[in-house]
Image: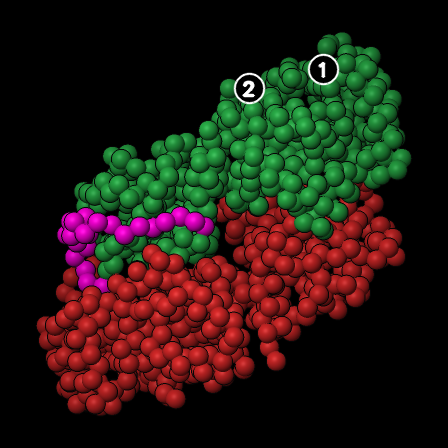
Chain colours: A green, B red
Amino acid sequence: MADLDRLFHPESVAVIGIPSDPNKWGGGNWIETLLELGFEGKIYPVSPNMSEFKGLRVYPSIEDIPDSIDLAVISVPARFTTQVMQECARKGVGFVQFYTAGFSEMGGKGSSLEIEVAEIAVRGGVRVVGPNCMGVYCPRGRFSWRLDFPQESGAVAFLSQSGFNAVQVATMGVARELRFSKVISYGNAADLNETDFLEYFAGDPETRVITAYIEGVKDGQRFITALRRTAQVKPVIVLKGGRSKAGARATVSHTAALAGTRTIWESVLRQAGAIEVRSFDELLDVALAIQCLPALASGGVALIGTGGGPSVVGADECEDVGLTVPPLPEHVVEALRQFVPQEGTSVQNPFESPFGFGQSRQQLQETMALIASCHEIASLIIHLEIDTLLHFRGERELSIIIDALISASRDCSKPVIVVLRTSGLPEDVRAILEQQQALVACGIPVYPTIRRAALAISKVLEYQRSRP
Amino acid sequence: MADLDRLFHPESVAVIGIPSDPNKWGGGNWIETLLELGFEGKIYPVSPNMSEFKGLRVYPSIEDIPDSIDLAVISVPARFTTQVMQECARKGVGFVQFYTAGFSEMGGKGSSLEIEVAEIAVRGGVRVVGPNCMGVYCPRGRFSWRLDFPQESGAVAFLSQSGFNAVQVATMGVARELRFSKVISYGNAADLNETDFLEYFAGDPETRVITAYIEGVKDGQRFITALRRTAQVKPVIVLKGGRSKAGARATVSHTAALAGTRTIWESVLRQAGAIEVRSFDELLDVALAIQCLPALASGGVALIGTGGGPSVVGADECEDVGLTVPPLPEHVVEALRQFVPQEGTSVQNPFESPFGFGQSRQQLQETMALIASCHEIASLIIHLEIDTLLHFRGERELSIIIDALISASRDCSKPVIVVLRTSGLPEDVRAILEQQQALVACGIPVYPTIRRAALAISKVLEYQRSRP
């Protein structure tokens, strides 16, 4: 197993290749980002065309640097990469992360160049991430290629064959209150590949949930073995790219990956005990559920929230994804009636609860406790219509309601999942993010729709059932 | 067929029942809302307990009003409704909309009360909306029960058995740039029901797309006939509530509706040529597609946008819902290469286009024209990663890109659908809403994910195929 600690926490970084055009992405961006983030290791820019960059001395070659180098970020044009890799090998660099594209994803000469460069690295003892990738984002090490990635560390690792998908998941994660231990964009995987990162994350104490975007694997047997072992110790959530005909065609020109057939992948993932997802939203939704509710038990869900119509649609959505919304016993229904004085309110499961409209803190708590006491119920989905609450009650009262909900959830004997239904307007979105932060901090996962909450729960339950 | 013009555009409105507790929803809310919206008809508050409300004279009974009444909004407690309906009948009121709950959705005495009150109305020539409903929202008539519903009129009608679902769809519509001609929340449908509203919207010149949330129908044969006829003249999009066991149980206590079985509903809707959807998002997504692209043709989609990984996942998502993303002919690929100078860029379908990163207005236009010229391609999905564009280019440059996209779409020989991928953070959401407004105003529908765009397109194509 590759020891990747030095890759994710380098103490000295050489950045090779700084485009003179500031609009062209390259080494300059890495240096600026590391400086801005307060990266604590040493940064050595390398370029034959300048002597200083952002106040740092620039070296003409990596071999001129009077220090050992843990990680070299390479963004020189493809035609220079053989020479640069030879220099890295002579220098005894630990890792290179290779932004440069124009290799096996182009086919022909690109493929042979990739093989040549990888061989130089391997012979010289240098481990390679890429080429055609963005490399490492590790918040604890203050190492990143984007300033808008969260600076706090979290429990989710993401290994991504695509750089843009790494961006998508990391930035979407911010709005879902998910934080990452390590993210790696590894592109064509000429040397280090999905299996190396999977094995490393399996043993990484910072990482509790592993997520992955994979287009193709380099060594199927080794991958399957590693996946099965990893899934036994940590949940592994996989978005497979190239499941379709057009998608598979695209992976070849994207990262030179052979996508494999959809059915083979589905059965490999299922048999290994991994969780397959189909979109970025689903990947984040399941990661959030599994991070917040590691011990979610099988059984029915209770659906409790604002509005009769949304309750009906929500129940349909739960059963669409295989959850059951069982009726509550008659004595519980009788006891619940005291909390819903209004006529025209559905007292059953789904249960239409007047959140924020004349319901006391204690009533909310007793409602949830009563429903949680039913053996038919394994978890509670609480859904609120944020637009209506903000419109009639205002933001301060929304905070009070969420506070009451957090306190009732703490006292509740079953896991609670919250859905904050929104119109999607910016003022709603902002208010929701604030409340979501408070909820997730208390281990309560938050979803924008009942459908997405239900799908995440059903995926987690499927995963629990598959475990020995 | 019922003539409902006077219901949606009343010239004189009586509001019967004003709760003394301002926290209790009731007639006071309607009066305040109508005043605030600048409703141009006359408003007559009715209550035995006060003489003035918001500067308006309050009448002890509807019979004391010295004017004819088009519409009476009733929100008195259920026990007073027999008397109030008798007064409305004697007064010769055209329509009542009946907020009061506690009727057939409660079963037992509630059911017999509902029958009794409806009979009084019918004998007196009064048409009833409800009970247990929110009634009319008609922006052109400045009639509504919520100030946060859009005040501009649009082409979409929504008939909703649920008041909360009417709120959900109307407010979510704002954030999707959808506007409504008329929305009706009709609850228990003691008199006027889904079929009456469907027939009215079929003939309503303001309405181009009909959407519906239905829990159960009162007269199956009449409904099926009306649905078939309506679907021949206008697209009808139906979200059926109570498709599941738990959902069907909930409809009984929600609006006393018998939900019917899922398979019967699916075949009824399909045979009638209606479009079935499964969520609010899907309802709005399809309505937007059909409003913007009434003549979308069958055939492959071209997927053009930012990022190799998102392109792969996007292609998978298109094929997941039955769309094809066909390869482009070799001569087109050759011609496209001039627009993607970078290595590591996928030149095929999906096509990775460097939006906002060194691509000129003319290059964008030529790229789209070239792809649209392929007979394999029937429509173009353009997807942009807004977070990255805002981060590196800023909002002004985003506007310039969107402007170029609108202009290229105008010149494009095939329909264009735009996906603005977002992190979900409020600043992104705000920027997207602004760009979305410009795009939708030019007839270009906008979606938050490729998956949702693809599903909407596939639903519209399915609908087109089902038409004679």
Q: Chain of mark 2?
A: A
The N terminus of chain B lies in quadrant: bottom left
In this orientation, which residue lies closer to the viewer: B148 or B2?
A: B2
Q: Residue at x 57, y 46 (%)?
A: A279
Q: Residue at x 71, y 62 (%)?
A: B300
Q: Which contiguous range is marked in magenta?
A: A321-344
Q: Which numbered circle lies on residue A203?
A: 2
Disc 1: CA contacts within 10 A as few (<14), some (14-19) or many (>=20): many
Dominant secondary structure (helix, strand or loop) of the stretch shown in magenta: loop
The C terminus of chain B lies in quadrant: bottom right
Q: Chain of mark 1?
A: A
The amino acid type found where label 2 is placed reads Gly
Residue A73 is left or right of residue A139, and the answer is right
* Secondary element at image label 1: loop
Would you identify the image quadrant in which residue B88 lies? bottom left
Would you identify the image quadrant in which residue A69 lies? top right
* Secondary element at image label 2: helix
Q: Residue B211, position in %: x, y?
A: 46, 71
